Image (cartoon, rainbow, N blue to C red):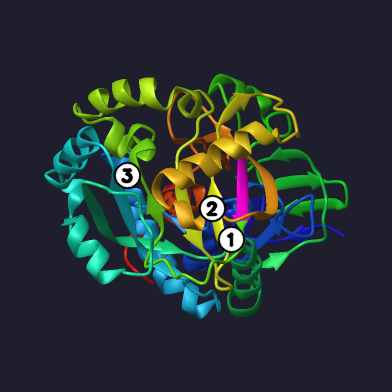
Amino acid sequence: MVEKTDVVVVGQGIVGLAHAYAAVRSGRSVCVIDRHSRALGASIRNFGFVTVTGQARGEMWALAMRARDVWARVAPQAGIDVLQTGLTVFAHRPEAVDVLAEFVQTEMGERCELITEQAWRRDNPAIGVTPFEVALRSPHELRIEARDAIPKLRTWLEREHGVRFLEPADVIGCDAARVETTRGAVQGDAVFVCPGDDLNGLFPETMARHEVTRCKLHMLRLGATGVKLPSPVMADLSLVRYEGYSGLPTAHVLRQRLEIERREMLAAGVHLIVVQSADGTLVVGDTHEYGDAPTPFQPQDKDALMLDALRDTLPGMATDPVERWIGSYAWSPQGPWFSEEVRPGVHMTVVTCGAGMSTAFAIAEQVVSRALNTDLSEAA
């Protein structure tokens, strides 16, 4: 028997779930198809860090601000705990101070502030931080536990919004109003394909035209120290990686110094993000390695570089790893995301910069609004 629905979503990572949510908000019935019974890819292998501050200036920053607001509304409804809020970026070098000083003067510095080392230590006396010049404090970010949040989001969409998640199946064909799977066909008026880093599945020619490849990253979970971080943490290396900072003129001078002092870390794509889970453990990362088929192996030397980066900022937090994993997400040199109508009524959306958790809700609003001729820009 052929399943019938208004909208078919292919993929149940965060981008697919965001499209499903946008579609049900428009009043459509929705079916979701995935080859697995649960999300296993980039959406559960990340920091769970909805990051606004540091996203590329312009569209990406605006998308992250909007997506953050959607997360803040959806999380309590779906039973998803917000474990941390905000962000602290420590500037250990004078050149990093210059980047942060320039940043807060832009529109991206909205509601952010620079605080002195003395003021920060007064508020956080239990946390041992390497001496720093100033710290940027942002109020915008949310931190959730991704591996728990994505299943809870799926359950909420199913229970409260009537989204149907079909039995696991591979999609073998996709055309206007009909999706062919290994378990049969599904008919819908619109189809949204959200393949993540599946380069050779549906519409590989589109992925190739956008030069989509993969980014492999290493991540660690470290044992609890009994100290509670007031927010997620970044530091100097992040200022030459995140485009909201690295696109500023002062970032070039900081990179020159880091190329001398932290050349090996930069070569491995290491920068520091530290978030804390409910049990006190820390998720720390990460590295970046690009290619269409990165190896599944996790060399110890790259994990050691991440721990060295942590010791640069929070030396007392560098406990032994209790868990290690590899992530992989879609990446393209052409831009941070794309969506196009690959066939009449079939829309393909890929976030190609590793910021799916931070932007997917906002991207999906735009894509679905355009495809279904509706307006989802207002909070709902």
Magenta part of the chain = 217-221
Query: How many numbered callouts?
Result: 3
Give the Cα separation between the discs numbered 1 and 2: 22 Å
The tag earlier along the polypeptide, 2 or 3, is 3
Q: Which of 134 and 78 is in front in this view?
A: 134
Whether the magenta-drawn stretch holds residue 220 is answered as yes
Reading the image, the residue beneath label 1 is 146
Q: Which amino acid does label 3 sit on?
A: Gly
Residue 273 lies left or right of residue 282; in this view the side is left
The tag earlier along the polypeptide, 3 or 1, is 3
Picture coordinates of residue 127 (x, y %)? 38, 64
Q: Which amino acid does label 1 sit on?
A: Ala
Residue at coordinates 74% horizontally, 59% vertically from top-left?
38
Q: Which mark is residue 318?
A: 2
Q: Nearer the viewer, residue 353 or 167?
A: 353
Q: Which mark is residue 54?
A: 3
Q: Which amino acid does label 2 sit on?
A: Ala
Residue 292 in view? yes
Label 1: few (<14), some (14–19) or many (≥20) C-alpha neighbours in 10 Å: many
5 lies above or below 278? above
Picture coordinates of residue 311 (x, y %)? 46, 46
Whether the magenta-drawn stretch holds residue 324 is answered as no
Magenta stretch: helix, strand or loop mostly: strand
Q: At numbered mark 3, what does the secondary structure look like: helix, strand or loop? A: loop
Q: At numbered mark 1, what does the secondary structure look like: helix, strand or loop? A: helix
Quadrant placement of the N terminus? bottom right
Q: Residue furthest left?
A: 105
